[in-house]
């Protein structure tokens, strides 16, 4: 049983590395490099292709994180009864787990907004040359930028919670 628990934790951590690491790589490395590429059409093509590929990889990682997270909780003795009665959340472990799950839920919502609404809209605006698209583009860039920063902060807090739970 201990081996399978360790294996599930390893898979959970690796999936988190893929998701969070990918977000940090794009924000810290790729976007600054893209800003130097000329002509702008190349930036758009690289960003669009990378975003589509990372969207698939990241959502697979998210599914793995959710499945292994449930298995980890079960392996740690979390039961539906302890959750439904609130007994779990009266312990230090339960409070940290609740915080981690809340942060993960927020990250999922922000990621969905980014991946399925704001990100595609940004690519569309980057490709557009219609009048007034520049202001929309700047506004959308700010939204995407702030959303990414908040999600990264939540990701760091999730890792901190994971450390406290281990």
Image (spheres, helix red, strand yellow):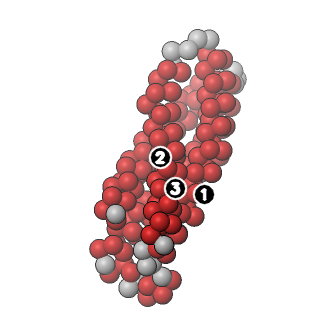
Expressed as whole percent of the image width and height from the top left, the position of residue 122 reads 61, 33
- Does label 3 or label 2 sit earlier along the sequence? 3
- Note whether residue 132 is visible: no
State how far apart marks 3 and 1 are (Cα): 12 Å
State how far apart marks 3 and 2 are (Cα): 10 Å
Measuring 47% from the left and 65% from the top, which residue is drawn there?
3
How crowded pointer 1 is (Cα within 10 Å; few <14, some 14-19, many 20+) is rated as few
Image quadrant containing the C terminus: bottom left
- Kind of element beneath mark 2: helix
The residue that mark 2 highlights is 17
Expressed as whole percent of the image width and height from the top left, the position of residue 102 reads 44, 64
Is 164 on the left or on the right of 138, as rendered? left
The residue that mark 3 highlights is 11
- Note whether residue 130 is visible: yes
Q: In this view, does 8 lie above or below 140?
A: below
Measuring 47% from the left and 56% from the top, which residue is drawn there?
10
Q: Residue 63 carries which label?
A: 1
Q: Residue 33 carries which label?
A: none
Q: In this view, does 114 lie above or below 25?
A: below
- Does label 1 or label 2 sit earlier along the sequence? 2
Q: Do the residues labelled 3 and 2 touch (CB within 8 Å)?
A: no
How many numbered marks, from 0 up? 3
State how far apart marks 1 and 2 are (Cα): 13 Å
Q: Do the residues labelled 1 and 2 touch (CB within 8 Å)?
A: no
Is 61 on the left or on the right of 103, as rendered? right
- Does label 3 or label 1 sit earlier along the sequence? 3
Front residue of 143 and 109: 109
Quarter occupied by residue 131:
top right
Measuring 69% from the left and 21% from the top, which residue is drawn there?
129
């Amino acid at each position: 049983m201990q081996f399978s628990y360790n294996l599930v934790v390893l898979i959970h951590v690796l999936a988190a590395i893929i998701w969070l690491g990918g977000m940090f790589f794009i924000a810290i490395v790729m976007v600054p490099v893209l800003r130097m590429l000329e002509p702008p059409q190349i930036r758009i093509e690289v960003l669009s292709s990378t975003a589509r590929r990372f969207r698939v990889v990241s959502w697979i990682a998210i599914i793995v994180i959710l499945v292994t997270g449930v298995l980890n909780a079960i392996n740690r003795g979390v039961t539906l009864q302890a959750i439904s009665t609130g007994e779990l959340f009266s312990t230090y472990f339960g409070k940290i787990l609740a915080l981690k799950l809340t942060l993960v839920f927020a990250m999922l919502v922000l990621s969905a907004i980014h991946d399925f609404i704001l990100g595609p809209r940004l690519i569309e605006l980057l490709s557009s040359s219609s009048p007034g698209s520049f202001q929309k583009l700047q506004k959308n860039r700010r939204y995407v930028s702030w959303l990414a920063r908040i999600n990264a902060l939540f990701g760091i807090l999730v890792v901190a919670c994971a450390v406290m739970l281990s």
